[in-house]
Image: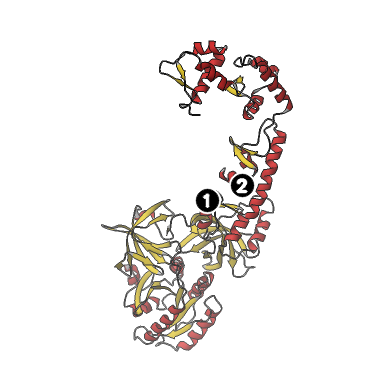
Amino acid sequence: MFVIATAGHVDHGKSTLVQALTGMQPDRWAEELRRGLTIDLGFAWTQLRPGSTVAFVDVPGHERFVPNMLAGIGPVPAVLFVVAADEGWMPQSAEHLAALHALDVRHGLLAVTRSDLADPGPATAAALAEIARTSLGTVEAVAVSPPSGTGVPQLRAALDRLLTRLPDPDLDAPVRLWIDRAFSIRGSGTVVTGTLAAGRLRVGDELEVASAGRTARVRALQSLGRPVPEAVAAARVAVNLRGVAHHELRRGDALLTPRRFHGSDVVDVRIHGDPDASLPPSVMLHLGSAAVPARVRRLGGDTARVTLARPLPLHIGDRGLLRNPGQHEVSGGITVLDVAPPALTRRGAATARATVLAELDGHPDERSELRRRGIVRLEHLERMGVTVTARPVAGDWLVEEAVSTRLRSELTRLVTGWRRDHPLEPGPPIDVVRRALRLPDRSLVHALLVPPLTVRDGRVIRADQPADLPAPVARAVDKIRADLAATPFTAPAVEQLAALGLGARELAAAVRTGALVQLADGVVLLPDSIRQAAAALGDLPQPFTVSQARQALGTTRRVAVPLLELLDRRGLTQRLPDDRRRVRNSSEETS
């Protein structure tokens, strides 16, 4: 299927022409039929030849309904431009053409209606000249008179030739179905319609409903009035949804492939048109079927920051237009350059940002985005519309190679400096490293490690450097070692430790290096004493009490209780239900 929108001045015969081509009345509302005026979007379709079906989005031509017109042409790739021979080029002809040019529509056909009422030559020449100055360029023109059928076969043939020139839609692209109608059908529930410009929809698919902040499931699909199990772009589709009420949806909302679009309320754009033309600060942004109030801040000659009144699901490279509703004119077309731009908070940030944007072309390039962002989640890039081929370094985090090199150098300097400034510590804690390097996630610290750097006990250390103690601490530990030589289970008192200059940090350093083992706060022994204690307790009648253990070791409850608990944890002893213990034999030990 191919989808084409109509365009042209009010009452130039767009709906009549669509009816002559399809045999269907595109105007849906009683008010439209009563007034003979298209107010909202209409839809009709026909088969030009076997295997070549074209669906028309018939748009209103009256200036009061230009937003409705823009909702119709936004998602489609081609246009049937209509001009009446007896009236020629008119104001809404110019506004519709300006909108098509702003949206960069490149495929079209001119139909000159009412050719039985006036010579179509002048109107044709004038319209072709206007069209040639836009993105549509040179188009074929056909003079028609729908009431009599004159020219309709020739127009069908011209449409068929147009369709052969349309680019193939990307069937593997994520779905973004801009909604142009939402309603409820008794027995079926919520139904929305739209133009599927890329990708494919299947019954049972789960889709994000961006505006509702949740997902909905496709209950049923229709295309060209018939139920289908799958709809493939390009197509007009009606989607029956489960999980969302119709009053929660409106024109301009979108159904999305989950996690593939970025909800943006601030975007940086390139403005197409006269770079010297003044832009009003408040405009309407039209993109897809959406129309959103927006504020524009110029950054460079043709770049600007656009702040939206509500988020839209966008990709880099999306085309839209800015319209001044007060003046009833198109202010310019836009290409989205960045859907997640940085805040402009520092002096000179806007000028610097304009320099960056000047180099962007609106194509979602992986290397460019990764170079500018340095560190970014894979999903974040995919939501921007970037095809990602790089492999994440940790989780779904991507790091640009030059950034990785710089961060590894900074990490090495950080660890070396930390050991110098904190001699009691083997290296900085992981969270200290993460904050110092301004990393968004702890996993990136591990990803940046290269030998000899490694992580031990939650700290980044150099594995090739011995865990030496500062000289004063080493001398204090030697004094304790000498004191415990004869009585290995007589732990030094807190006062003695303080007199030796061994506070909490010094003791922690001694424990980390293996010079001491800590039983409890302020209770330390030599590492060899643990096995010695197990051997001594093994000589007791089994099982034994804490008091018996204390006497056998020649120590106090202050030492005996935490020592026995440590032996329990290491699997050297077993605590029994009656609080007595027994020494495990070597085959029972767990550590």
Q: Which residue is mark 2?
A: 448
In the image, what residue occupies the spot 48% across and 82% down? 88
Upstream in the sequence, badge 2 or badge 1? 1
Label 1: which secondary element: loop
Which of discs 2 and 1 lies nearer the camera? The answer is 2
- Relative side of 167 to 559, left or right: left
Q: Count residues near mark 1 (Cα–Cα under 10 Å), then give few for <14, some for 14-19, many for 20+.
A: few
Q: CA distance from mark 2 to mark 1?
A: 15 Å
Q: Position of residue 577 (x, y in %)?
A: 40, 18
Q: Quadrant of residue 241?
A: bottom left
When the figure is inspected, residue 262 is found, relative to residue 118, above or below; the finding is above
In the image, what residue occupies the spot 69% across and 29% down? 469
Q: Quadrant of the N terminus?
A: bottom left
- Relative side of 471 to 369, left or right: right
In the image, what residue occupies the spot 55% across and 48% down? 394
When the figure is inspected, residue 412 is found, relative to residue 587, above or below; the finding is below
Q: Count residues near mark 2 (Cα–Cα under 10 Å), then give few for <14, some for 14-19, many for 20+.
A: some
Q: Quadrant of residue 438?
A: top right
Indicate the amino acid at tag 2. Answer: Leu
Q: Position of residue 304 (x, y in %)?
A: 61, 60
- Relative side of 60 to 91, left or right: left
Q: Position of residue 359 (x, y in %)?
A: 64, 64
Q: Position of residue 455 (x, y in %)?
A: 60, 39
Q: Which residue is mark 1?
A: 396
In the image, what residue occupies the spot 64% across and 30% down? 513
Label 2: which secondary element: helix
Which of 91 and 259 lies nearest the eye of the viewer? 259
